[in-house]
Image: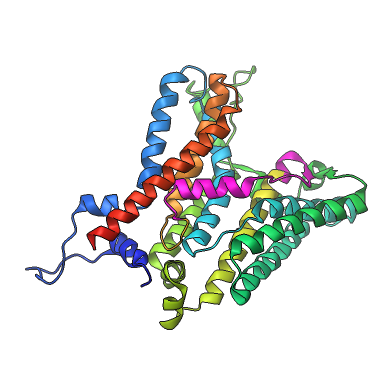
Amino acid sequence: MGDGLMTDQAAATASPPPQAGGDERLKQTSRTKKLMSRPELGAVAGTILVFIFFAIVAGDSGMFSALGIVNFLEVAAQLGILAIAVSLLMIGGEFDLSLGSMIGAAGVLVAIPAVELGWPIWLSIFFAFAVALVVGYINGIITVRTGLPSFIVTLAFLFILRGLTIGFTRLITGRTQVSGLHDLSEGDWLAPIFNGEVLGFVFFWLADMGMIDTLRDGVTPRVQGIPMSVVWFLVLGAIATWVLLRTSFGNWIFAVGGDKNSARNVGVPVTRVKVILFMCTAAAATLFAVIQVLDAGSADTNRGLLKEFEAIIAAVIGGCLLTGGYGSAIGAMFGAIIFGVVQQGIFYTGVNTDWFKVFLGVMLLIAVLFNNYIRRRMTESK
């Protein structure tokens, strides 16, 4: 279908075993070739290289202590939540440049009702998600119905959302920041799902065994659990991978990204698929915002600046093609892990953090070149 990327990727991941005796009409594909066709291959290799590099240059700096590991996992997880949704949208052949502005808007949509209007935190969170879904729906409908590039539509919403967020926040509060959420979130039944920790007993046991560092009291571990952002990251990654590889909707995503006209001709609901994907990216931005707002105890209208580009970089490093129809949620997760490891690794090695942007640009260029090479090899082998 389309340029054949959907069929190739599906065959590489879910091809049935050959019949006994074989069929000379069926072309057999080696395991090595199947592995080489996986979109996340480059990201996995890059992750291994990054870990080896920092193990050598920063192995004794505390980067790979329990605290250091949780730190870079938390950075990776928060970006990964965005990158997973962005990867699905890119596979579907679209972009969402309003993602960063949606983060800032969602944070304010949680904070203002709670602080200024006295809403409970759980209700403010539901309100933020509801508004985000509406924004995603509008982005999707305008893109599909007008035929305009999603780059242009969502770029417009990048400015619209940021401007509305700043304007209304300053109008209501007189400031661009809204604080006071820490006290309001205490005792809220929904807040721990976004700002809590899990498996704390494991870390206390490890501290008791002397396997991880403790505070000055010698009992309390410096890391008291796995942040919920990491849990969300893993759960969303598993769900997205299952959807892509095991459901009809996943096949539809590959189809509309490969060739939307061919997909429509065989009965794929192109409009529905694209609108749902835009709603998913808006929801992911809101999840990111809620996690950060509850952790910081405040909202800032400028939060999320340039996050849309970081998420796209993670998705591209993870194997997503800019032309759509090919990619992997797992690859996007590894792309986010590379991001988190390098960002924290630069901090632990004491290198000027300005060089991190250079690394991102280089990794993006390498990822695009590698992905184009894989796509060319796949096309030539057909």
Q: Position of residue 279 (x, y in %)?
A: 62, 65
Q: Position of residue 110 (x, y in %)?
A: 77, 54
Above or below, 316 relative to 266? above
Q: Position of residue 364 (x, y in %)?
A: 48, 42
Q: Tag count in the figure?
A: 0
Q: Residue at coordinates 89% horizontally, 49% vertically from top-left? A: 170
Q: Is 217 left, or right, of 371 in this rendering? A: right
Q: Quadrant of residue 119?
A: bottom right
Q: Quadrant of residue 200?
A: top right
The foreground one among 100 and 82 is 100
Was residue 315 drawn as part of the magenta stretch in this picture?
yes
Above or below, 265 relative to 103? below
> Over which residues does the magenta segment extend?
293-321
Check the picture and name the quadrant holding the C terminus. bottom left
Q: Quadrant of residue 78?
A: top right
Q: Is 101 left, or right, of 112 in this rendering? A: left
Colour convention: rainbow
Q: Is 115 left, or right, of 247 in this rendering? A: right
Check the picture and name the quadrant holding the N terminus. bottom left
Q: Position of residue 38 (x, y in %)?
A: 33, 53
Q: Name the outermost residue toward the left.
A: 21
- Decide if residue 331 is in sight here: yes
- Decide if residue 70 is in sight here: no
The foreground one among 305 and 130 is 305
Q: Is 167 left, or right, of 199 in this rendering? A: right
Was residue 12 drawn as part of the magenta stretch in this picture?
no
The foreground one among 12 and 16 is 12
Q: Residue at coordinates 47% horizontally, 17% vertically from top-left? A: 60
